[in-house]
Image (tube, rainbow, N blue to C red):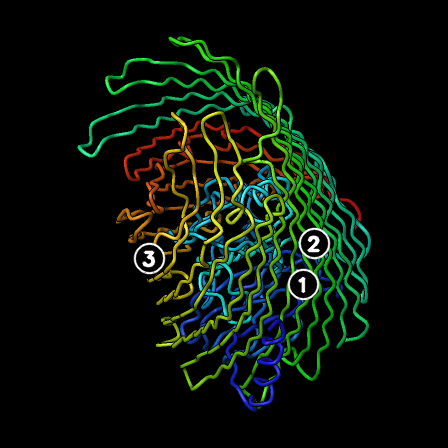
Amino acid sequence: MRYKGLLLLTLLYFICTSSPLFAQFSISGKVLNDQGKPFEKASVSLLSLPDSSLFMQTSTNESGQYDFQNNTHGSFVLRISAVGYETQWTRSYATSAGDRITATPIILKTASIAIETVHMYGKPPAIQQFVDKMVVQVEETVLAEGNSVLELLEKTPGIVSDGKGNFSIQGRTGANIKINGRDVYISGTQLANMLRGLQARDVAKMELISSPSSKEDAAGTAGIINIITKKNKRSGFGGDLFVRGSHTRKKQGSAGGGLHYKTDRINFFTNVSTGYEEEKAHSRLSRSWTNEQGQLVSKQTQTEKIRLSPGRYHSIHSGITVDFDTTKTLEASFNWVKGKFISYADIDIDFLNGQNQLLERAATRNNFDEGYNNLTFNVNYTKKYNSDNHYLKLNVDYAPHTNKYDNAFYTDYLETTTTRPTSARHNIQDLSNTTYSARLDYSRPIGEHSLYEIGWKGSHFYIDNQRSNDTLKNNNCIKDETSSNNFQYTQHVEAAYLTFASKIQRFEYKLGLRSEYTYTKANQKTNAATKENNYLHFFPTAFVSYNLTEQHALRGSFSSRIERPNDHDVNTFRVYEDAFTYYEGNPDLKPERSNILELGHSFKNKLFTTLGLSHSRDVRTWITGTGNLPNQTFSRPENIGKHKNYSASIMYNNSFTPFWTGSHYINGFHNRYTGTVNDIELDTKGSSWTANSRHTLTLAKDWRIEALGYYKSPVVNGVRKTAEAYGLDIALEKKLLSERAMIKLAANGLIRNAKPSFSSTFNNLYIESQNFPDNRKVLLSFHYRFGN
């Protein structure tokens, strides 16, 4: 059964004889000064003919190179300008799908007449919409400095994060995180911790792919969030150093840097960072139980004070690219993220009766020590043939991850009519997660406007989770057999895909089919319970676009996705969060399936509108219920039934003045969940909207200021409804020492209500949670670049 995907791949290869091309056009070139050297930061404008209106704008890099990519085809001309130099124009270019045009090198000559200084800055828009994804630029933003990648995702338009490693796109839960197009092989809190240890300064851009093609993994019912890291573009030897300090209620700091070396054949880079942080937060939680008539029976009110002291993390990102010749390239990369977080919590819980009279109070002291060590090794080989679209790629991943937890809490009972001794729990968990993955992709053009892609991927990961829990009984620590266990989990996936695309005048389409065979084995070694499962699913995809005119274009997409249960979801043994709360897995969970349809329109590559519809079945969500003991609650994942999501979004990029640019995004969506859980009917729904507006002002040659405002309304997710959140961040940047140094001052959360709060109603239990995290930050950083 494991080789079904490979057999299907072989069959598809032999039956595939032709296919069409679905691609964007590109225009690239180089600008030189009158000495023949690369001209950096020349303004390059792409003008649409016949009216010469501005279509796109960029600036040349350190090598004097520029590049435009878009899917709105037509006739264009390039205008190249710089202060103190004569403006140059190229000949006109007529573009169509798949064209890769290299313009003749342009030489800028010094102007003979002095002119008043005018600053022109051409950078990609902060947000760009393509036929299959939305791209958020990070590299050129001032506000990225000082944030972790987790914080960066929380502020990205179109994304909703719960802070625990779970992300939504346009209201749809279950987004899969990738880094440079490759899986990270962890999820939940493990993923959140890893993203917390990565620096936003190392990110170039983020791709929000709500309807991925068949070339990508089908995992992730909301699509894919692909984090693209920066690549070295400078020739020769050089590097950079940075140091930053920040303050919330407590202090944080980090430092690091990188080295690079680039020749015509070799490009090597390495980036390192280390950080230290402390936090202080608090929360309030209430649980209310009612009878069938809706009358209050009992209630718990909880207050929690949390201290992170300290949190430490370290990371190394290193890679090398070797071009053996113009057709063969070998890439290898190594990523390491390690962290240790020690936190303390004081929890007070009041137990009340139906008349809100105090019955008992419990005071808990909680110590939590968490460490993680995540490694990823990757090797990628590319063989190009007679064009860029004719290639063979082989990719191999090896990713060992480990997590260690040491948690202890002690509970004293106060103001009670009965004498109760102190209760205690000590939890030690040692978890290892090892993944092996290999992927083969082949692409070949046929004729002038044809292309097919075919590929295979196999992934295998193994998890070993050893947990030992002790509890206090009669003043003696004894092992708790209900929560101590050794759990092993295996998942093997074999996949094959084929894509077929075509262009007929102004109409383009791309069709794809992916098959994925999945085998899982959950082994509860403690009680000798084993559960195996295997299934084969097919995932069709389709993309279409139609250029109505040179300024208007339509696009559409359809994709089928899956969200498989992970090891935490199916592990039946209990994990206690405090003396009265625990969560456990569900071994009978089914994979969640969803179909996503999107329609969009673009105008002048500035205004984009998108309508979306998503339908999911066997939706998985966490349900909170009443435990077996008095005053006890538990959480468990359940397949609750169906989920429908309707969404609409508008994105607009504009330039108020030559020195003031803006990108704006607004998204509205409606969620509805229906089904049955434990013979209880579920029907929850709600409409929500999010908005994001970023403004960049270039005050002078060496000064930039950036402001970001965002708002997220309450969102319905299963039985939960999250609270609203809004904020305003502002940052100032000053370049020094001939632009080799940079100093930044930022205020994150200058205005902020980013509280991950929620309410939940299920059966006879109502929960309301208010969290007050330590997320208002003032930051000062210094960055210096040396060498080339």
Q: Which mark is residue 399?
A: 2
Q: Which mark is residue 642?
A: 3
Callout 2 secondary element = strand
Whole-angstrom CA distance, mark 3 to mark 2, is: 34 Å
Of 187 and 608, nearer the camera is 187
Q: Is residue 658 above or below residue 97?
A: above
Residue ID for mark 1: 437
Callout 1 secondary element = strand
Q: Is 94 left or right of 744, judged from the image as shown? A: left
Q: Residue at x 20, y 27 (%)?
A: 295
Residue 414 quadrant: top left
Whole-angstrom CA distance, mark 1 to mark 2, is: 9 Å
Type of amino acid at the residue the image marks with label 2: Ala
Q: Is 264 left or right of 154, judged from the image as shown? A: right
Of 105 and 482, nearer the camera is 482
Q: Which mark is residue 214?
A: none
- Res. 65 in view: yes
Type of amino acid at the residue the image marks with label 3: Lys
Q: Residue at x 36, y 76 (%)?
A: 549
Mark 1 touches mark 2? (CB < 8 Å): yes
10 Å crowding of disc 1: few (<14), some (14-19), many (20+): some
Q: Residue at x 79, y 56 (%)?
A: 268
Sequence-first disc among 1 and 2: 2
